[in-house]
Image (tube, helix red, strand yellow):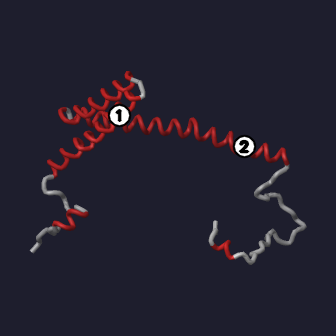
Amino acid sequence: MNTPYQQGPVSETVWAWVCPKNTAQAAKKKPVLKNSIALLVGLSVSGLFYWFDFPIMAAVVFLISASIFFCSLFFPKCSKAIERFLAWLSRTVGEALTWGLLVPFFYIWFTGAHVLLSLRGKDPMTRKLDYEKESYWQDKSAGDDLARYRRQF
């Protein structure tokens, strides 16, 4: 009475949400496929470095991509360790760039722009309060030009 759901071949092709039949075989193919794509990308980048006359960098990129590929084929534990290290490295570099470059750039740029606009007496956002005004509403004339509907932005 309690039979598991059998997914049809069409829906399995579109979205295989039922557990695959050979999970061990599917798990073994994924890293090899992913790393073979990484090898092709590495070879392409290496070829571009060689084409633009950077042979040392081409050799470094080739050796890194080939070693990662062969580790994924023959030493899966080593491949997982390399993947964890690269994940940690990318996260560290991303956080360093975010906090080390983007935050100071943001504050230096916007503080500098605010100081320059203040020195020139400009307030493009009209943030100063005018207590004598009844309303800050700004009337816009619609105009009779029908071409304005074609340029809405």
Label 1 close to label 2 by CB (< 8 Å):
no
Amino acid tagged 1:
Phe
Query: Exactly how many numbered labels are in the figure?
Result: 2
Quadrant of residue 35 in the image? Answer: top left
Q: Residue at x 21, y 67 (%)?
A: 11
Q: How far apart are marks 1 and 2 (CA)?
A: 38 Å
Count neighbours of disc 1 (C-alpha within 10 A) and say few if under 14, some if 14 to 19, many if 20 or more: few
Q: Residue at x 83, y 61 (%)?
A: 129
Which one is earlier in the sequence, the residue at label 1 or at label 2? 1
Residue bearing mark 1:
85
Above or below, comparing residue 120 to residue 90 in the picture: below
- Residue that protrudes farthest toward the left in the picture: 1
In this view, 133 is above or below 84: below
Task: Give the residue displayed 23% in from the left and 46% down from the top.
Answer: 30
Judging by the rendered image, the residue that carries numbered circle 2 is 111
Residue 109: x %, y % from top left: 68, 42
Q: What residue occupies the far right of the structure in this picture?
A: 132
Image quarter in which the N terminus is found = bottom left
Tell me if 139 is positioned left or right of 69 in this view. right
Q: Is residue 70 left or right of residue 109?
A: left
Q: Is residue 17 visible?
A: no
